[in-house]
Amino acid sequence: MTLEFDHVNCIYDAETNQPVKALSDVSLTIGGGEFIGLIGHTGSGKSTLMQHANGLLKPTGGRILADGTDIWSRDYDRRSLRARVGLVFQYPEHQLFETDVLTDVCFGPKNLGKSAKDAEALAKEALEQVGIDKSQFALSPFELSGGQKRRVAIAGVLSMQPEILILDEPTAGLDPRGRKEILSLVKRLHREKGITVVLVSHSMEDVARFADRILVMDHGALLLNESPASIFSRRETLQQIGLNIPETLLLLDELRRAGLGTDDPAMPLTPEDTAEVILSWLQ
Amino acid sequence: MASIKDITLGQYYPTESVIHRLDPRVKLVVTLGYILSLFLITTVPGYLLAALFLILWTGLSRVPLRFMLRGMKAVFLLLVLTIVFNLFLTPGEVLFRFWKLSVTREGLRTASLMATRLVFLIVGSSVMTFTTTPNHLTDGMESLMHPLKRLHFPVHEIAMMMSIALRFIPILMEETDKIMKAQMARGADFESGGIIRRAKNLVPLLVPLFISAFRRANDLAIAMEARCYRGGAGRTKMKPLIYQTRDLVAYGLLLLYLVLSVVIGRDLLHLQNLLTGVLAWRI
Ligand SMILES: Nc1ncnc2c1ncn2[C@@H]1O[C@H](COP(=O)(O)OP(=O)(O)OP(=O)(O)O)[C@@H](O)[C@H]1O
Ligand SMILES: [Mg+2]
């Protein structure tokens, strides 16, 4: 499915004397099995934008179209939209509430009207995908480690079989190993299931490694919407809004400035690739 | 979610005005004095005086009228019931009949007086919450209740508890909003169904909410202990409350108003009864 944002505006607390303009005139398209990175400074409107994608927030201006239909038109079934556009919130483990892991993951499918048996099958499949072992199905979610809880929470959304999966800062508050696990999980889901993924992040490195396309938000506006290569050639623009190009590219820039290497436009995004580029320069 | 925002507890309206700058103790005393006067007043000129005071009090606060009236929505039903009951159920000289009900002169009089009193009371006391931050308000209460310390009444502790509770209201409301959205993203439905169903549907909201409240309480307790908090003994204030000229002027005006409302607002027969009553009680 494709989601289209058409000149979307959002104002929080519009009726008070301190309205907050959180989104201004955002137009973009999400879909087609892409891996999209969404990046921006704190308070730039990333979470707000994503909550519009599945109809949790209603735009104060503009339209959101799902496969061409306005999701705020009368009689539109927004609950089934929420199954197709899975949204994993920041710190999703805070939403766990059931007595055991499996039942918690069943919550989504059951809400969609699936029978207990089907819901359980979907939940088991989702838990397997996120790498939770069968022996842990019967544990209380509160007995798990932080990283495991988060994976259970992600499974809670995956079990609804979304066509678009949006993850709002899925690595926030995890240690480096936990971060890596979650990111490779997301990458694997994208590759194996062919679903569209939107990864919201503060970290240019995380986004850079996986995204086919990067969206850059600044003060509620969509500043850039391009391929990683094209985004990273705009170092000044990024730095102006408090972001930076990935560290791997920064390192190569420094080396170039020191007179090492060539001006070839190599853009390695993983440490391994960077090491290879530097090696080739040295030889 | 709009429903959560409609609850305007601690409904501070930030703007610049004389009333905003008044000492919170003055505002508390004025509010109490005004409420007292509303119960003293029985005559029409007295009500005019109270109206005059209210116009001055709200006008000076520079809080738009529609915000004041928004607070009235919540008590609208109470207001209607007061009017209806007083109008139809007060015995006396019948003015006209309407189906099986009859409206009496006394009923008309009591209904209109009660309604006026109620509206004055709500608007008059809401000025205080509109113009004073919750923290200021508790500071004011703590200071006013200070004499009770002599009686070993835990004034500081109660004030601290109140300010913590007030501080947590917006946080918990935000948290509720977030968890609600997260569960709605998993297909939860908080809006339809009968009362039992709805109550059941609240479990996925309440469990995470309680867990988060306990987590926050724990964090706060640790943070306070880490800063050596140990109750009110020997504790000084960073911003002590100090009366300014305008505060004294306000007290003076309040006194004048109270005297006037006794003189104008009560018919003298009542006053005499009151006085003899008090004297009799003294003897
Ligand atoms: N429920 C709300 N009520 C009022 N204002 C809000 C609300 N949620 C967000 N805002 C404001 O809207 C703006 C955008 O917030 P948003 O949460 O979308 O930013 P973000 O890019 O996700 O930030 P972060 O990286 O910190 O998560 C901010 O200025 C924020 O203060
Ligand atoms: Mg966010």
Image (cartoon, coloured by chain):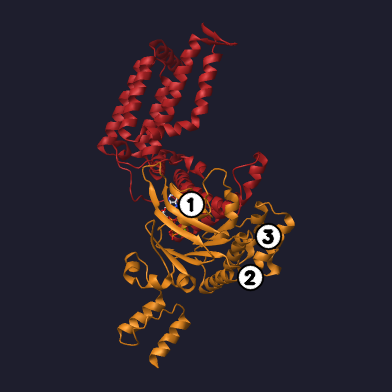
- Check the image and report above or below for B197 versus A177: above
* Residue lying farthest to the bottom in this orientation: A283
How far from the left and from the top, in percent, is residue A61? Answer: 42, 47
Q: In the structure shown, which secondary structural element does the residue marked by tag 1 occupy?
A: strand
**N-term-proximal mark, 2 vs 1:** 1
Mark 3 Cα shell of 10 Å, populated few (<14), some (14-19), many (≥20):
some
Q: Quadrant of the image for the C terminus of chain B?
A: top left
Say what amino acid the circle numbered 3 marks.
Asp
**Residue drawn 58% across the image and 51% down it:** B184
How far from the left and from the top, in percent, is residue A248? Answer: 41, 78
- Per the image, the residue denoted by label 2 is A131
**Residue drawn 57% across the image and 43% down it:** A75
How far from the left and from the top, in percent, is residue B239? Answer: 33, 48
Say what amino acid the circle numbered 1 marks.
Ile
Mark 2 and mark 1: span between their CA atoms?
34 Å
Q: In the structure shown, which secondary structural element does the residue marked by tag 3 occupy?
A: loop
Q: Is residue A215 left or right of residue A117?
A: left
- Badge 3: chain ID: A
User: Quadrant location of residue A155?
Assistant: bottom right
How far from the left and from the top, in percent, is residue A62? Answer: 43, 49
- Figure colour of chain A: orange
Chain represented in red: B
- Badge 2: chain ID: A
Q: Give me the disc on residue A126.
A: none
**N-term-proximal mark, 2 vs 3:** 3
- Per the image, the residue denoted by label 3 is A100
Check if mark 1 and mark 3 are on a common chain. Answer: yes
**N-term-proximal mark, 1 vs 3:** 1
The answer to which of B262 and A103 lies nearer the viewer is A103
Q: Give me the disc on residue A64.
A: 1
Is ligand 2 within 8 Å of the beta carbon of the residue shown at mark 3?
Answer: no
